[in-house]
């Protein structure tokens, strides 16, 4: 029953993230409002956006795998939240924050197993990784797969 509750919270977070992505892509996003929504989505999964932003790969792993193995729901939520945060940072002209966010999101997406069920309407991790590679290339950064990009 607890797992069902957690999955419902992740679905709610997914709904928030879909709206965030829609606003980013439509160019109608106020950064402060996006930050509030990203923070809300992260909190629904027991995560903190500010911590996601400052953690290194080891810290991210501890946040999503506090029971030993990466939790599928938390890993996906952290990865998707960081991905959208990075897109918003790039739109704001903050290339460094965008690069860091994309690198962290890529690290988390690489942890995901193909058998993990994602919230409805979201692409598989491999698709997000390809998108991140394209976004990093547009920023003039090549992702080397280690969680830190080479320039």
Image: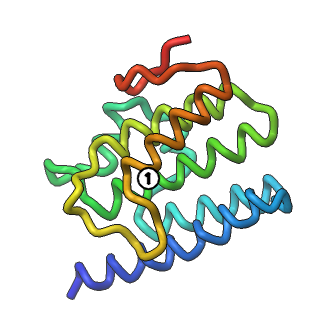
Q: Which class describes the residues within 10 Å of circle 1: few (<14), some (14-19), or many (20+)?
A: many
Left or right of 89, for residue 63: left
The extreme top residue here reads: 151
Say above or below: 39 vs 120. Answer: above
Determine the image quadrant of residue 58: top left
At x 53% / y 47%, what residue is drawn? Answer: 82
Q: On the rendered image, what quadrant is the N terminus found in?
A: bottom left
The extreme bottom residue here reads: 1
Left or right of 104, for residue 70: left
At x 70% / y 66%, what residue is drawn? Answer: 22
Q: Where is residue 125 in the image (x, y as percent from the top left)?
A: 37, 51
Q: How many labels does the image show?
A: 1
Q: Position of residue 88 (x, y in %)?
A: 71, 47
Residue labelled with disc 1: 78
Q: What element carries label 1?
A: helix
Q: Position of residue 151 (x, y in %)?
A: 56, 11
Q: What kind of colouring is applied to the model shown?
A: rainbow
Q: Where is residue 53 in the image (x, y as percent from the top left)?
A: 54, 39
Determine the image quadrant of residue 2: bottom left
At x 33% / y 48%, what residue is drawn? Answer: 63
The extreme left residue here reads: 68
Say above or below: 71 vs 52. Answer: below
At x 47% / y 41%, what residue is drawn? Answer: 130
Left or right of 86, for residue 73: left
């Amino acid at each position: 029953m607890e797992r069902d509750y957690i999955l419902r919270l992740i679905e709610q977070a997914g709904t928030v993230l879909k709206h965030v992505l829609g606003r980013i892509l439509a160019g109608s996003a106020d950064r402060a409002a996006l930050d509030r929504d990203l923070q809300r989505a992260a909190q629904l999964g027991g995560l903190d956006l500010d911590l996601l932003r400052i953690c290194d790969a080891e810290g991210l792993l501890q946040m999503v795998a506090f029971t030993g193995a990466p939790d599928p729901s938390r890993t996906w939520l952290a990865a998707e939240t960081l991905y959208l945060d990075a897109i918003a940072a790039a739109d704001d002209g903050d290339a460094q924050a965008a690069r860091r966010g994309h690198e962290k999101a890529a690290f988390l997406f690489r942890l995901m197993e193909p058998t993990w069920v994602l919230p409805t309407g979201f692409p598989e991790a491999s698709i997000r990784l390809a998108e991140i590679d394209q976004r990093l290339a547009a920023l003039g950064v090549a992702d080397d797969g280690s969680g830190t990009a080479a320039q």
